[in-house]
């Protein structure tokens, strides 16, 4: 199978950026593009895209977590069994995705993202600024943000009243995220936002939470023989994963993650939140336009 590597590497660059800026390990961007790239699979393309997305998210989220500052990761303290419940839900969701009708998975993907975007716009708590000044990191009373150089007195910041994500949300988040191949950030970022976290902190914490979902989901996707339509031309899959598409996406993503974690951009909290909603809308439209029944494949 000859995949358009340049196109997939370019999309990989975008997944690297979304991993750092929005906590998306690649699923939101990877699913539509792999559906497009593997359109020759027909209705099976969504299954392959979801499984491939899980592997891409696993690697991206693991790498992003490894380079996330420890002070951000400490915000996960107090979540109790959240991570094990995320992993358990992911196993159930990934197993269900292997046997669900492909059209169900595709339309569920579009519907969930669209409903989430509407929820973020209409229900209060997401667009409002977080409790801690998002434009400056405060360390020991010295400002390091754009409004003060290192060593200058910090601007007064609101008290951090953020709360941990309830552990009970782990099972449904893991199951839905793995079934749709979108990681957990579409649910964890809004939930942490409404729990009082800034966008910067919520998106940083989305990576370790996505890792808990992507690991079991990827293992399920890689295991066993894929229940695919034998009348369609299939590439050399590993389980349900397209290894060529996954490799190309990661080739583009990992350097971007390393760069942006080293030099993170300073984005005002409200702008960051609006950008998150804009990306959700764009991805929903991309999935609608990536209908494998009406597009030619990039794979040749």
Image: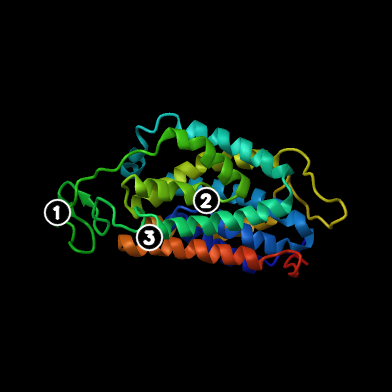
**x%, y% of residue 139?**
20, 48
The mark nearer the N terminus, 1 or 2, is 2
Q: State the separation of the CA atoms marked 1 and 2.
A: 35 Å
User: Which residue is pictured at 75% across the width and 69% down the height?
Assistant: 294
Secondary structure under badge 1? loop
Left or right side of 60 for 31: right
Q: State the separation of the CA atoms marked 2 and 3.
A: 22 Å
Q: Is residue 257 visible?
A: no
Callout in the foreground (2, 3): 3
Choose between 105 and 207: the one closer to the eye: 105
Q: State the separation of the CA atoms marked 3 and 1.
A: 22 Å
What residue is disc 2 on?
Answer: 60
**x%, y% of residue 137?**
24, 53
Give the quarter of the image for residue 107: bottom right
Secondary structure under badge 3? helix
Residue, far left:
153
The mark nearer the N terminus, 3 or 1, is 1
Give the quarter of the image for residue 106: bottom right
User: Which residue is pictured at 23% across the width and 55% down the height?
Assistant: 133
Residue, far front:
122
The mark nearer the N terminus, 2 or 3, is 2
Left or right side of 111 for 222: right
User: Which residue is pictured at 56% across the width and 33% down the height?
Assistant: 88
Left or right side of 36 for 142: left
What residue is disc 1 on?
Answer: 156
User: Which residue is pictured at 27% across the width and 56% down the height?
Assistant: 134
What residue is disc 3 on?
Answer: 273
**x%, y% of residue 113?**
54, 56
Question: Quick one: label 3, few (<14), some, or many (20+) residues within 10 Å?
Answer: many
Residues at badges 2 and 3 in contact (C-beta under 8 Å)?
A: no
Callout in the foreground (3, 1): 3
Choose between 2 and 162: the one closer to the eye: 162
């Amino acid at each position: 199978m000859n995949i358009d590597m340049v196109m997939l590497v370019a999309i990989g660059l975008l997944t690297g950026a979304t991993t750092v800026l929005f906590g998306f390990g690649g699923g939101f961007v990877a699913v539509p593009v792999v559906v497009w790239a593997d359109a020759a699979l027909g209705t099976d393309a969504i299954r392959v895209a979801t499984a491939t997305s899980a592997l891409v998210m696993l690697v991206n989220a693991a790498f992003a977590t490894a380079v996330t500052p420890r002070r951000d990761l400490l915000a996960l303290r107090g979540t109790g069994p959240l991570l094990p419940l995320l992993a358990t839900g992911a196993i159930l969701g990934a197993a269900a995705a292997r046997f669900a009708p492909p059209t169900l998975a595709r339309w569920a993907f579009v519907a969930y993202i669209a409903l989430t975007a509407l929820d973020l716009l209409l229900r209060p708590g997401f667009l409002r600024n977080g409790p801690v000044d998002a434009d400056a990191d405060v360390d020991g009373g010295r400002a390091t943000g754009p409004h003060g150089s290192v060593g200058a007195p910090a601007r007064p910041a609101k008290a951090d009243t953020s709360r941990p994500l309830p552990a009970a949300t782990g099972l449904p988040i893991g199951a839905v995220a793995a079934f749709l191949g979108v990681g957990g950030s579409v649910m964890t970022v809004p939930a942490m936002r409404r729990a009082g976290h800034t966008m910067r902190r919520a998106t940083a914490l989305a990576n370790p939470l996505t890792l808990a979902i992507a690991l079991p989901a990827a293992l399920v996707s890689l295991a066993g023989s894929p229940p695919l339509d034998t009348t369609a031309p299939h590439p050399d899959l590993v389980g349900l994963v397209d290894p060529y598409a996954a490799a190309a996406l990661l080739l583009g993503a990992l350097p971007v993650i390393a760069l942006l974690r080293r030099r993170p951009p300073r984005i005002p909290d409200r702008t960051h939140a609006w950008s998150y909603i804009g990306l959700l809308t764009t991805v929903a439209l991309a999935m609608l336009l990536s209908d494998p029944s009406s597009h030619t494949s990039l794979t040749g």
